[in-house]
Amino acid sequence: MTLNLFRRTKQLEQQIDSFFDKLSESSVVYRLAVRLYLREGLTDEFQERLERINTLESEADVLRRSIEQQLYTETLIPDSRGDVLGLIETVDQLLSQFEGSLWALSIEKPDIPDEFRNGYRKLTNMVVRAADELALSGRAFFRSPHDVPAHNHKVMLYEKEADAISTKLKMAIFASDLELSHKIHLREFVEQIDSVADLAEDVTDRLAIYAIKRLV
Amino acid sequence: MDPLILIFLSSGLFLGWALGANDAANVFGTAVGTKMVKFRTAAIICSIFIILGALVSGGGTTHTLGKLGAISALPGAFMTALSAALAVYSMTKSGLPVSTSQAIVGAIIGWNLFSGSPTDASTLTKILSTWIICPVLSAFIAIILFKMHKFTSKRIPIHMIMADAYTRFALIIAGALGAYSLGANNIANVIGVFIPGEPLPALQVGAFIFSSTQQLFLLGGVAIAVGVWTYSKRVMMTVGNNLGRLSANSALISVISHSIVLFMFASRGLEAWLAGHGLPTIPLVPVSSSQAVVGAVVGISILQGTAGIRWSVLGRIVIGWIVTPIAACFICFIGLFFLQNVFRLTVQ
């Protein structure tokens, strides 16, 4: 019975680690895909990246369901179960945001003028950094909750920086001579990308409370 | 064997049942209350180890209780055990973790008062002092263990899920140790008053011969186990949730502290070791496992900030501790009067 308990526990631990691996991998693929779009437009390689993100999101969904089911059916971590489920679900929303953002690029094929591409690139880099740091914070929550505040602080800094970049980019877009419809279309994509950092910050707000609860 | 003996023993078995119903909560209450261990698992482990503790290490505390009042007549022992059982049962009914040790001490004093036997003041003082020392010591041990846990958990990062499994495993081990200590320390409360009368004839099973005392220990252990199975869940919930919200780790620490304290007051080996090294010995006294666990829970709560303690529940528990020995003493005195004057039985 004891060996079985530890074996199942190890499996669940691996699933949680694997779930955060999906987040880290998604952020890398997302960054590559957006940069590819900015450089070459809608290519086969971009479609491959999009498919990869889809697969990662589906795999994360499967892991999320499995983790949730095990936590409830085996009545594990009764004190933190709700917190872990909340964390997993909000991180899953972030993964969906990555996927949704690439789908929007693929479907709407926005025409991004050269002068704005660097802004989009910078913004993408910043939101991906926020997501990467969130993945570290999420992992720390399970192993060393004392380290969560340090990671969260970085996520908030990246989010703030992403906000600054997106504001500057939107101002530049609306100051240009483009058609209003084109401007609105471009703004839509700035907000799409920026929302990744916003979501990451929302998750860290939750994580901060969860970590305090674990430390008390 | 005289069938009347079994009737007289029934009150001891009733007290054993009440002890199981009430005190198993002290061993596994925090674990079951925090949903870390299933009640069924707790009940199985508790039953096995209580019986083992009673059989292997039950002798030490029984001796001390015998010194408080040597009840040689079986009807007297019957009423003493019955009074204690009734006092414990009524408290258990109201969901309070009452002390069986206090109940039996109160009942023995009731017998002493009725029979005109002198109460050994030094033994009584020794027992009464443990009623204060036990919860204080338990709180102190819990605080030390809690600080050690905090210190190590900061330095050794273990995945939350794995830590949960370790805690569950540790709760079961600590619960088993606690149940063993409970059996060893508290079996005296259940059958101690019957031992001087040697009511059961020696029983031969194969090559083994079981004395009256050994049979009484086994019967008492089984009665406690029945109490665990049939009635302990409610008190477990009181200990686990009502006094103060406990985390799984706090639950573990409170059980370990409780077990250490009970073991300290029951171990002849520890007593011999301390004496051998010229250190002051710890009296072998049946202490209250309820007091030990409540002391530990309060100790942890103090460390975490007293806001977490539900003072009204704690107050009710403490009042229960004061009322129990007085009630048991009173019931015993009245009961002995009836046995002697209405049923014409020899009680002393």
Image (cartoon, rainbow, N blue to C red):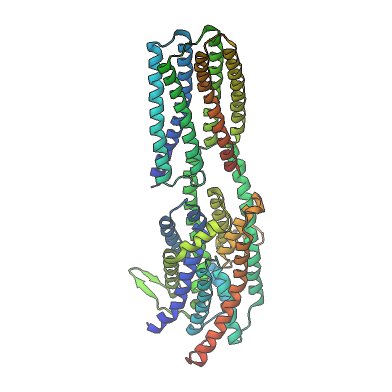
Dividing the picture into quadrants, the one containing residue A174 is: top right
Q: Is residue A25 visible?
A: no
Of A15 and A56, the residue lying toward us:
A56
Query: Image height check: is B125 above or below A116?
Result: below
Query: Image height check: is B258 above or below B165?
Result: below
- At which x and y percent is residue A195? 53, 25
The residue positioned 55% from the left and 85% from the top of the image is B334
Query: Image height check: is B334 above or below A47?
Result: below
| Numbered circles on residues, count | 0
Dividing the picture into quadrants, the one containing residue A201 is: top right
B265 with respect to B208 (left or right)? right
The residue positioned 39% from the left and 24% from the top of the image is A54
The residue positioned 41% from the left and 81% from the top of the image is B7
Of B84 and B231, the residue lying toward us:
B231
What is the quadrant of the C terminus of chain A in the image?
Answer: top right
B245 with respect to A49 (left or right)? right
- At which x and y percent is residue B313? 60, 62
B157 with respect to A18 (left or right)? right
- At which x and y percent is residue B197? 48, 81
